[in-house]
Protein backbone atom coordinates (compact mmCIF):
# COMPACT_ATOMS: atom_id res chain seq x y z
CA UNK A 1 0.00 0.00 0.00
CA UNK A 2 1.29 3.49 -0.75
CA UNK A 3 2.98 5.44 2.01
CA UNK A 4 1.34 8.59 3.33
CA UNK A 5 3.72 11.55 3.69
CA UNK A 6 3.63 14.49 6.06
CA UNK A 7 6.27 17.19 5.76
CA UNK A 8 7.68 18.90 8.82
CA UNK A 9 7.70 22.66 8.52
CA UNK A 10 10.12 23.23 11.42
CA UNK A 11 13.73 24.10 10.82
CA UNK A 12 15.68 20.99 9.91
CA UNK A 13 18.61 22.22 11.98
CA UNK A 14 16.34 22.53 15.02
CA UNK A 15 15.05 18.98 14.60
CA UNK A 16 18.59 17.69 14.05
CA UNK A 17 19.69 19.35 17.28
CA UNK A 18 16.77 17.91 19.26
CA UNK A 19 17.44 14.38 17.99
CA UNK A 20 21.18 14.68 18.63
CA UNK A 21 20.48 15.91 22.17
CA UNK A 22 18.47 12.76 22.89
CA UNK A 23 21.36 10.53 21.85
CA UNK A 24 23.78 12.54 23.97
CA UNK A 25 21.48 12.41 27.01
CA UNK A 26 21.14 8.62 26.62
CA UNK A 27 24.89 8.13 26.22
CA UNK A 28 24.61 6.53 22.77
CA UNK A 29 27.73 6.45 20.60
CA UNK A 30 27.92 4.55 17.30
CA UNK A 31 31.73 4.34 17.42
CA UNK A 32 33.39 1.09 18.56
CA UNK A 33 36.57 0.70 20.60
CA UNK A 34 39.70 0.18 18.51
CA UNK A 35 40.25 -3.38 19.76
CA UNK A 36 36.69 -4.39 18.81
CA UNK A 37 37.17 -2.93 15.33
CA UNK A 38 40.49 -4.75 14.95
CA UNK A 39 38.93 -8.07 15.98
CA UNK A 40 36.03 -7.54 13.56
CA UNK A 41 38.43 -6.80 10.71
CA UNK A 42 40.40 -9.98 11.46
CA UNK A 43 37.26 -12.12 11.47
CA UNK A 44 36.00 -10.48 8.26
CA UNK A 45 39.30 -11.14 6.51
CA UNK A 46 39.24 -14.86 7.33
CA UNK A 47 35.71 -16.07 8.18
CA UNK A 48 35.46 -19.64 9.47
CA UNK A 49 32.67 -21.32 7.50
CA UNK A 50 30.91 -24.52 8.63
CA UNK A 51 31.64 -27.81 6.86
CA UNK A 52 27.99 -28.64 6.15
CA UNK A 53 26.89 -27.28 2.77
CA UNK A 54 23.40 -26.01 1.94
CA UNK A 55 24.46 -23.64 -0.85
CA UNK A 56 22.27 -25.65 -3.27
CA UNK A 57 19.13 -24.36 -1.47
CA UNK A 58 17.60 -21.32 -3.19
CA UNK A 59 17.41 -19.07 -0.13
CA UNK A 60 16.17 -15.48 -0.46
CA UNK A 61 16.06 -12.61 2.02
CA UNK A 62 13.07 -10.30 2.53
CA UNK A 63 13.80 -7.01 4.26
CA UNK A 64 13.02 -3.28 4.09
CA UNK A 65 14.58 -1.52 1.13
CA UNK A 66 18.18 -0.55 1.73
CA UNK A 67 18.81 -3.05 4.54
CA UNK A 68 22.37 -4.31 4.88
CA UNK A 69 22.28 -6.20 8.22
CA UNK A 70 20.45 -9.28 6.92
CA UNK A 71 19.78 -11.79 9.72
CA UNK A 72 17.45 -14.25 7.96
CA UNK A 73 17.05 -16.04 4.65
CA UNK A 74 14.23 -18.47 3.86
CA UNK A 75 13.17 -21.22 1.50
CA UNK A 76 9.87 -23.10 1.42
CA UNK A 77 8.85 -26.27 -0.42
CA UNK A 78 5.98 -28.72 -0.55
CA UNK A 79 6.33 -31.88 1.56
CA UNK A 80 3.45 -34.18 0.60
CA UNK A 81 0.32 -32.41 1.82
CA UNK A 82 2.47 -30.33 4.17
CA UNK A 83 5.51 -28.08 3.89
CA UNK A 84 9.19 -27.85 4.68
CA UNK A 85 10.48 -24.47 5.80
CA UNK A 86 14.20 -23.72 5.87
CA UNK A 87 15.21 -20.61 7.79
CA UNK A 88 18.85 -19.58 7.78
CA UNK A 89 20.03 -17.25 10.56
CA UNK A 90 23.32 -15.34 10.38
CA UNK A 91 26.20 -17.18 12.09
CA UNK A 92 27.16 -14.33 14.41
CA UNK A 93 28.84 -16.63 17.01
CA UNK A 94 31.53 -17.36 14.40
CA UNK A 95 32.51 -13.66 14.48
CA UNK A 96 32.67 -13.16 18.26
CA UNK A 97 35.39 -14.53 20.53
CA UNK A 98 33.85 -15.33 23.94
CA UNK A 99 35.17 -12.74 26.36
CA UNK A 100 36.87 -10.80 23.56
CA UNK A 101 36.47 -7.10 22.72
CA UNK A 102 33.44 -7.54 20.38
CA UNK A 103 31.75 -9.70 23.02
CA UNK A 104 32.43 -7.16 25.77
CA UNK A 105 31.10 -4.28 23.69
CA UNK A 106 28.01 -6.25 22.59
CA UNK A 107 27.20 -7.07 26.21
CA UNK A 108 27.55 -3.38 27.02
CA UNK A 109 25.17 -2.38 24.20
CA UNK A 110 22.64 -5.24 24.32
CA UNK A 111 20.98 -4.43 21.00
CA UNK A 112 21.04 -2.13 18.00
CA UNK A 113 19.43 1.22 18.76
CA UNK A 114 17.31 2.88 16.07
CA UNK A 115 16.63 6.61 15.80
CA UNK A 116 15.29 8.84 13.01
CA UNK A 117 18.76 10.27 12.39
CA UNK A 118 20.66 6.98 12.37
CA UNK A 119 21.34 3.83 14.32
CA UNK A 120 23.81 2.64 16.92
CA UNK A 121 24.67 -0.96 15.91
CA UNK A 122 25.28 -3.89 18.23
CA UNK A 123 28.32 -5.14 16.27
CA UNK A 124 30.94 -3.36 14.15
CA UNK A 125 29.43 -2.75 10.68
CA UNK A 126 32.21 -4.69 8.93
CA UNK A 127 30.63 -7.76 10.55
CA UNK A 128 26.94 -6.84 10.93
CA UNK A 129 26.59 -5.26 7.47
CA UNK A 130 29.33 -7.24 5.75
CA UNK A 131 31.01 -10.51 6.61
CA UNK A 132 28.20 -12.02 8.73
CA UNK A 133 25.23 -10.53 6.85
CA UNK A 134 23.36 -12.90 4.50
CA UNK A 135 23.97 -10.70 1.47
CA UNK A 136 22.84 -11.71 -2.00
CA UNK A 137 25.25 -13.97 -3.87
CA UNK A 138 27.69 -14.32 -0.95
CA UNK A 139 28.60 -17.62 0.69
CA UNK A 140 27.95 -17.29 4.40
CA UNK A 141 27.78 -19.39 7.52
CA UNK A 142 24.32 -19.77 9.04
CA UNK A 143 22.29 -21.65 11.61
CA UNK A 144 19.77 -23.41 9.38
CA UNK A 145 16.44 -24.37 10.93
CA UNK A 146 14.53 -27.01 8.96
CA UNK A 147 10.91 -27.29 10.08
CA UNK A 148 8.47 -29.81 8.62
CA UNK A 149 4.82 -28.80 8.84
CA UNK A 150 1.63 -30.76 8.36
CA UNK A 151 -1.29 -29.63 6.20
CA UNK A 152 -2.61 -27.45 9.04
CA UNK A 153 0.72 -25.65 9.52
CA UNK A 154 1.69 -27.40 12.77
CA UNK A 155 5.38 -28.27 13.13
CA UNK A 156 5.95 -32.02 13.18
CA UNK A 157 9.77 -32.11 13.14
CA UNK A 158 12.60 -29.60 13.57
CA UNK A 159 16.32 -29.91 12.91
CA UNK A 160 19.08 -27.32 13.27
CA UNK A 161 22.61 -27.28 11.88
CA UNK A 162 25.38 -24.84 11.10
CA UNK A 163 25.91 -24.81 7.35
CA UNK A 164 27.17 -22.74 4.45
CA UNK A 165 24.41 -20.99 2.52
CA UNK A 166 24.13 -18.54 -0.37
CA UNK A 167 21.18 -16.19 -0.74
CA UNK A 168 20.03 -16.03 -4.35
CA UNK A 169 18.30 -12.67 -4.09
CA UNK A 170 17.68 -9.78 -1.70
CA UNK A 171 13.99 -8.91 -1.93
CA UNK A 172 12.19 -5.92 -0.50
CA UNK A 173 8.74 -6.42 1.00
CA UNK A 174 7.24 -4.66 -2.00
CA UNK A 175 9.07 -6.89 -4.50
CA UNK A 176 8.19 -10.04 -2.57
CA UNK A 177 4.52 -9.04 -2.50
CA UNK A 178 4.57 -8.41 -6.25
CA UNK A 179 6.18 -11.82 -6.85
CA UNK A 180 3.53 -13.55 -4.74
CA UNK A 181 0.71 -11.70 -6.47
CA UNK A 182 2.29 -12.65 -9.80
CA UNK A 183 2.31 -16.37 -8.99
CA UNK A 184 5.90 -17.03 -7.85
CA UNK A 185 5.76 -20.71 -6.85
CA UNK A 186 8.14 -20.66 -3.89
CA UNK A 187 6.99 -17.37 -2.41
CA UNK A 188 3.35 -18.39 -2.81
CA UNK A 189 4.10 -21.04 -0.18
CA UNK A 190 5.06 -18.22 2.21
CA UNK A 191 1.52 -16.91 1.83
CA UNK A 192 0.05 -20.39 2.41
CA UNK A 193 2.17 -21.15 5.47
CA UNK A 194 1.74 -17.63 6.81
CA UNK A 195 -2.04 -17.83 6.68
CA UNK A 196 -2.02 -21.26 8.34
CA UNK A 197 0.20 -19.95 11.13
CA UNK A 198 -2.02 -16.88 11.62
CA UNK A 199 -4.99 -19.23 12.03
CA UNK A 200 -3.07 -21.26 14.62
CA UNK A 201 -2.14 -18.05 16.43
CA UNK A 202 -5.80 -17.06 16.60
CA UNK A 203 -6.69 -20.51 17.96
CA UNK A 204 -4.08 -19.97 20.72
CA UNK A 205 -5.62 -16.57 21.55
CA UNK A 206 -2.46 -14.90 20.33
CA UNK A 207 -2.47 -11.19 19.55
CA UNK A 208 -0.51 -8.85 17.32
CA UNK A 209 -0.57 -5.09 17.02
CA UNK A 210 0.56 -5.00 13.37
CA UNK A 211 1.18 -1.27 13.72
CA UNK A 212 1.58 0.66 10.48
CA UNK A 213 5.25 1.40 9.90
CA UNK A 214 6.15 4.99 10.69
CA UNK A 215 9.52 6.42 9.77
CA UNK A 216 11.06 9.85 9.88
CA UNK A 217 13.15 10.32 6.74
CA UNK A 218 15.54 13.13 5.91
CA UNK A 219 14.96 14.37 2.35
CA UNK A 220 17.39 17.12 1.47
CA UNK A 221 16.67 20.12 3.66
CA UNK A 222 13.57 18.75 5.34
CA UNK A 223 12.18 15.79 7.23
CA UNK A 224 9.28 13.70 6.00
CA UNK A 225 7.11 11.38 8.08
CA UNK A 226 6.24 8.25 6.14
CA UNK A 227 3.41 6.11 7.50
CA UNK A 228 2.84 2.85 5.66
CA UNK A 229 0.41 0.05 6.33
CA UNK A 230 2.01 -3.40 6.51
CA UNK A 231 1.84 -5.53 3.38
CA UNK A 232 0.42 -9.06 3.74
CA UNK A 233 3.87 -10.53 3.04
CA UNK A 234 5.23 -8.78 6.12
CA UNK A 235 2.72 -10.59 8.32
CA UNK A 236 3.43 -13.93 6.63
CA UNK A 237 7.18 -13.39 6.95
CA UNK A 238 6.79 -12.50 10.63
CA UNK A 239 5.00 -15.80 11.21
CA UNK A 240 8.10 -17.73 10.04
CA UNK A 241 10.20 -15.88 12.61
CA UNK A 242 7.61 -16.48 15.35
CA UNK A 243 7.42 -20.18 14.48
CA UNK A 244 11.22 -20.45 14.71
CA UNK A 245 11.22 -18.70 18.09
CA UNK A 246 8.58 -21.13 19.36
CA UNK A 247 10.65 -24.11 18.21
CA UNK A 248 13.72 -22.61 19.91
CA UNK A 249 11.74 -22.33 23.14
CA UNK A 250 10.57 -25.94 22.86
CA UNK A 251 14.15 -27.17 22.44
CA UNK A 252 15.41 -25.27 25.47
CA UNK A 253 12.41 -26.24 27.60
CA UNK A 254 13.14 -29.89 26.82
CA UNK A 255 16.56 -29.56 28.47
CA UNK A 256 15.61 -26.75 30.88
CA UNK A 257 18.64 -24.86 29.61
CA UNK A 258 18.60 -21.48 27.91
CA UNK A 259 16.63 -18.25 28.04
CA UNK A 260 13.06 -17.44 26.98
CA UNK A 261 11.24 -14.25 26.07
CA UNK A 262 8.14 -14.00 28.28
CA UNK A 263 5.17 -11.71 28.74
CA UNK A 264 2.25 -12.02 31.20
CA UNK A 265 -1.41 -11.85 30.29
CA UNK A 266 -2.70 -8.26 30.59
CA UNK A 267 -4.42 -7.56 33.92
CA UNK A 268 -8.21 -7.56 33.75
CA UNK A 269 -8.23 -3.89 34.75
CA UNK A 270 -6.09 -2.95 31.75
CA UNK A 271 -8.43 -4.83 29.42
CA UNK A 272 -11.45 -3.03 30.91
CA UNK A 273 -9.72 0.34 30.49
CA UNK A 274 -8.84 -0.50 26.91
CA UNK A 275 -12.47 -1.45 26.22
CA UNK A 276 -13.59 1.96 27.51
CA UNK A 277 -11.09 3.70 25.25
CA UNK A 278 -12.27 1.68 22.25
CA UNK A 279 -15.86 2.66 22.99
CA UNK A 280 -14.87 6.34 23.33
CA UNK A 281 -13.00 6.24 20.03
CA UNK A 282 -16.14 4.89 18.41
CA UNK A 283 -15.34 1.29 17.48
CA UNK A 284 -17.56 -1.74 18.24
CA UNK A 285 -15.94 -4.50 20.30
CA UNK A 286 -18.27 -7.38 21.10
CA UNK A 287 -18.43 -8.69 24.65
CA UNK A 288 -16.63 -12.01 24.92
CA UNK A 289 -14.39 -11.38 21.90
CA UNK A 290 -10.71 -11.83 22.77
CA UNK A 291 -8.66 -8.66 22.37
CA UNK A 292 -6.36 -10.46 19.92
CA UNK A 293 -9.25 -11.33 17.60
CA UNK A 294 -10.57 -7.77 17.91
CA UNK A 295 -7.22 -6.25 16.96
CA UNK A 296 -6.85 -8.64 14.02
CA UNK A 297 -10.10 -7.60 12.36
CA UNK A 298 -9.64 -3.81 12.56
CA UNK A 299 -9.42 -1.90 9.28
CA UNK A 300 -5.81 -0.69 9.24
CA UNK A 301 -6.61 2.16 6.84
CA UNK A 302 -8.89 4.05 9.28
CA UNK A 303 -7.38 6.82 11.45
CA UNK A 304 -9.38 5.56 14.43
CA UNK A 305 -7.70 2.15 14.08
CA UNK A 306 -4.26 3.66 14.57
CA UNK A 307 -5.51 5.39 17.73
CA UNK A 308 -6.88 2.05 18.99
CA UNK A 309 -3.60 0.26 18.24
CA UNK A 310 -1.70 2.96 20.12
CA UNK A 311 -4.02 2.47 23.12
CA UNK A 312 -3.62 -1.33 22.88
CA UNK A 313 0.11 -1.10 23.55
CA UNK A 314 -0.73 -1.04 27.25
CA UNK A 315 -1.96 -4.64 26.90
CA UNK A 316 1.51 -5.72 25.80
CA UNK A 317 3.49 -4.61 28.85
CA UNK A 318 5.67 -6.60 31.21
CA UNK A 319 7.76 -8.47 28.63
CA UNK A 320 10.99 -9.87 30.01
CA UNK A 321 13.48 -12.74 29.85
CA UNK A 322 13.68 -15.86 31.99
CA UNK A 323 16.74 -18.09 32.28
CA UNK A 324 15.72 -21.75 32.46
CA UNK A 325 16.80 -24.08 35.24
CA UNK A 326 15.62 -27.38 36.68
CA UNK A 327 12.78 -25.79 38.62
CA UNK A 328 11.40 -23.80 35.67
CA UNK A 329 7.64 -24.16 35.18
CA UNK A 330 6.72 -24.06 31.49
CA UNK A 331 3.18 -22.94 32.30
CA UNK A 332 4.59 -19.69 33.74
CA UNK A 333 6.91 -19.02 30.82
CA UNK A 334 4.56 -18.19 27.96
CA UNK A 335 4.73 -15.10 25.81
CA UNK A 336 1.08 -14.04 26.13
CA UNK A 337 0.88 -12.16 22.82
CA UNK A 338 2.02 -15.31 21.03
CA UNK A 339 0.07 -17.70 23.23
CA UNK A 340 3.01 -20.10 23.63
CA UNK A 341 6.58 -20.32 24.97
CA UNK A 342 8.90 -18.27 22.78
CA UNK A 343 12.56 -17.27 22.47
CA UNK A 344 14.40 -14.57 20.57
CA UNK A 345 16.61 -16.38 18.06
CA UNK A 346 16.23 -14.89 14.57
CA UNK A 347 18.06 -11.53 14.84
CA UNK A 348 21.58 -12.13 16.24
CA UNK A 349 23.09 -9.26 14.25
CA UNK A 350 20.83 -6.82 16.10
CA UNK A 351 20.07 -8.45 19.46
CA UNK A 352 22.57 -9.98 21.91
CA UNK A 353 20.35 -12.68 23.41
CA UNK A 354 19.78 -14.37 20.04
CA UNK A 355 23.45 -15.41 19.81
CA UNK A 356 23.18 -17.36 23.06
CA UNK A 357 19.85 -18.92 22.10
CA UNK A 358 21.22 -20.13 18.75
CA UNK A 359 24.21 -21.80 20.34
CA UNK A 360 22.07 -23.45 23.04
CA UNK A 361 19.55 -24.72 20.50
CA UNK A 362 22.14 -26.08 18.04
CA UNK A 363 23.84 -28.06 20.81
CA UNK A 364 20.54 -29.40 22.22
CA UNK A 365 19.17 -30.30 18.78
CA UNK A 366 22.28 -32.36 17.99
CA UNK A 367 22.74 -34.01 21.39
CA UNK A 368 25.91 -32.15 22.29
CA UNK A 369 26.96 -30.36 25.44
CA UNK A 370 26.19 -26.65 25.45
CA UNK A 371 29.47 -24.70 25.14
CA UNK A 372 30.58 -23.45 28.52
CA UNK A 373 30.89 -19.84 27.34
CA UNK A 374 27.26 -19.85 26.22
CA UNK A 375 26.01 -21.39 29.46
CA UNK A 376 28.09 -18.98 31.57
CA UNK A 377 27.00 -16.04 29.40
CA UNK A 378 23.39 -16.37 30.56
CA UNK A 379 24.45 -14.84 33.87
CA UNK A 380 23.40 -11.22 33.78
CA UNK A 381 21.85 -11.55 30.31
CA UNK A 382 18.31 -10.90 31.57
CA UNK A 383 19.43 -7.60 33.08
CA UNK A 384 21.41 -6.62 29.97
CA UNK A 385 18.42 -7.20 27.69
CA UNK A 386 15.96 -5.51 30.04
CA UNK A 387 18.10 -2.39 30.45
CA UNK A 388 18.94 -2.15 26.75
CA UNK A 389 15.27 -2.68 25.90
CA UNK A 390 14.29 0.16 28.21
CA UNK A 391 16.95 2.36 26.61
CA UNK A 392 15.70 1.49 23.11
CA UNK A 393 12.12 2.28 24.14
CA UNK A 394 13.19 5.59 25.64
CA UNK A 395 15.10 6.51 22.48
CA UNK A 396 12.11 5.64 20.32
CA UNK A 397 9.60 7.41 22.58
CA UNK A 398 11.61 10.62 22.90
CA UNK A 399 12.44 10.69 19.19
CA UNK A 400 8.76 10.29 18.36
CA UNK A 401 8.00 13.13 20.80
CA UNK A 402 10.31 15.41 18.81
CA UNK A 403 8.61 14.45 15.57
CA UNK A 404 5.11 14.89 16.98
CA UNK A 405 5.97 18.31 18.39
CA UNK A 406 7.45 19.34 15.04
CA UNK A 407 4.30 18.20 13.25
CA UNK A 408 1.90 19.88 15.65
CA UNK A 409 3.75 23.11 16.47
CA UNK A 410 2.20 25.04 13.54
CA UNK A 411 -1.24 24.05 14.87
CA UNK A 412 -1.17 25.76 18.28
CA UNK A 413 -4.73 26.86 19.02
CA UNK A 414 -6.31 24.12 16.87
CA UNK A 415 -8.85 21.72 18.37
CA UNK A 416 -8.71 17.91 18.28
CA UNK A 417 -10.81 14.92 19.34
CA UNK A 418 -9.13 12.80 22.01
CA UNK A 419 -9.59 10.07 24.61
CA UNK A 420 -8.35 10.27 28.20
CA UNK A 421 -6.04 7.33 28.92
CA UNK A 422 -4.74 8.22 32.38
CA UNK A 423 -5.75 10.73 35.06
CA UNK A 424 -3.48 12.41 37.62
CA UNK A 425 -3.77 15.18 40.20
CA UNK A 426 -2.26 17.77 37.87
CA UNK A 427 -4.12 16.76 34.72
CA UNK A 428 -4.28 13.73 32.48
CA UNK A 429 -2.69 11.88 29.58
CA UNK A 430 -4.78 11.95 26.44
CA UNK A 431 -4.53 10.32 23.05
CA UNK A 432 -5.56 12.25 19.98
CA UNK A 433 -7.72 10.36 17.51
CA UNK A 434 -5.91 11.89 14.51
CA UNK A 435 -2.96 12.23 14.48
CA UNK A 436 -2.62 9.40 17.06
CA UNK A 437 -0.50 11.23 19.61
CA UNK A 438 -0.22 10.92 23.41
CA UNK A 439 0.30 14.11 25.42
CA UNK A 440 -0.40 15.89 28.69
CA UNK A 441 -3.71 17.71 29.04
CA UNK A 442 -5.32 20.07 31.55
CA UNK A 443 -8.61 18.33 32.29
CA UNK A 444 -10.62 16.73 35.09
CA UNK A 445 -12.07 14.07 32.76
CA UNK A 446 -11.84 10.41 33.71
CA UNK A 447 -9.98 7.67 31.79
CA UNK A 448 -12.03 6.39 28.87
CA UNK A 449 -13.86 9.69 28.30
CA UNK A 450 -13.81 11.26 24.86
CA UNK A 451 -13.11 14.99 25.04
CA UNK A 452 -12.38 17.92 22.74
CA UNK A 453 -8.99 19.54 23.37
CA UNK A 454 -7.00 22.55 22.18
CA UNK A 455 -3.24 22.55 21.58
CA UNK A 456 -1.71 25.10 23.97
CA UNK A 457 2.02 24.34 23.92
CA UNK A 458 4.46 22.67 21.49
CA UNK A 459 8.01 23.48 22.54
CA UNK A 460 10.64 21.60 20.52
CA UNK A 461 13.56 22.84 22.63
CA UNK A 462 11.98 21.63 25.87
CA UNK A 463 10.33 18.64 24.11
CA UNK A 464 7.01 19.55 25.68
CA UNK A 465 3.53 19.09 24.20
CA UNK A 466 0.40 20.09 26.12
CA UNK A 467 -3.34 20.46 25.52
CA UNK A 468 -6.31 21.83 27.44
CA UNK A 469 -9.87 20.57 27.41
CA UNK A 470 -12.29 22.73 25.44
CA UNK A 471 -15.20 23.49 27.71
CA UNK A 472 -18.67 23.51 26.11
CA UNK A 473 -19.89 27.05 25.48
Image: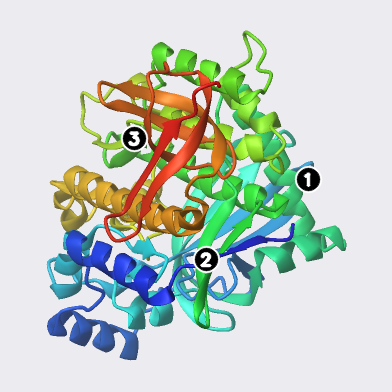
Residue lying at the far right in this picture: please name it: 182
Give the residue at the far bottom of this rendering.
45
Give the Cα separation between the discs numbered 1 and 3: 38 Å
**In 3D space, how far apart are the residues under numbered discs 2 and 1 (Cα atoms)?**
54 Å
SS class of the residue under badge 2? loop
Residue denoted by label 3: 319
| Sooner in the amino-acid sequence: mark 1 or mark 3 | 1
- Rendering coords of residue 454 (x, y %): 49, 37
- Front of the two marks 1 and 3: 3
Q: At which x and y percent is residue 196?
A: 71, 37
Q: Is residue 130 above or below residue 318?
A: below
Q: Which residue is mark 1?
A: 80
Q: Is residue 454 left or right of residue 388?
A: right
* Helix, strand or loop at mark 1: loop
- Mark closer to the observer (3, 2): 2
Q: What residue is shown with label 2?
A: 8
Count of number-bearing discs: 3
Which residue lies most toward the front here?
473
Closer to the camera, 318 or 192? 318
Label 3 residue SS: loop
What is the spatial separation of the Cα atoms under label 3 and label 2, in whole angstroms?
A: 34 Å
Residue 313: horizontal and vertical position, in percent? 46, 34
| In the image, residue 168 above or below residue 422 | below
Which dot, 2 or 1, sits closer to the camera? Answer: 2
Give the residue drawn at x 26%, y 62%: 22
Q: Quadrant of the C terminus?
A: top right
Horizontal side of residue 213 vs 190, given as left or right: left
At x 64%, y 35%, the residue is: 304
Q: Residue furthest top?
A: 287
Q: Height in image: 310 above or below 327?
A: below
Q: From the viewer's side, name the closer residue of 464 and 351.
A: 464
Amino acid sequence: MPARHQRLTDSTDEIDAALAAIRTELGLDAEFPADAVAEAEAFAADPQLPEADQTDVDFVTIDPEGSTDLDQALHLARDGDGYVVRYAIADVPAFVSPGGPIDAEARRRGQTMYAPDGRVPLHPPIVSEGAASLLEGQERGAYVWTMRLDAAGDVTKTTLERARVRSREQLTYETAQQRIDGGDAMLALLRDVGELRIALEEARDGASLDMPEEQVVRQGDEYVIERRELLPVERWNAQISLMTGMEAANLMLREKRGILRTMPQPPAGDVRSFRKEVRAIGEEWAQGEHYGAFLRRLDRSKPTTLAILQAARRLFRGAGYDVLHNGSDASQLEQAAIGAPYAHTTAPLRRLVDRYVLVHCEAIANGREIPQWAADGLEGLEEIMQSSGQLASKLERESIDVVEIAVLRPRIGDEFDSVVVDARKNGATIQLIDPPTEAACDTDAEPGERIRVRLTEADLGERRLRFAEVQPS
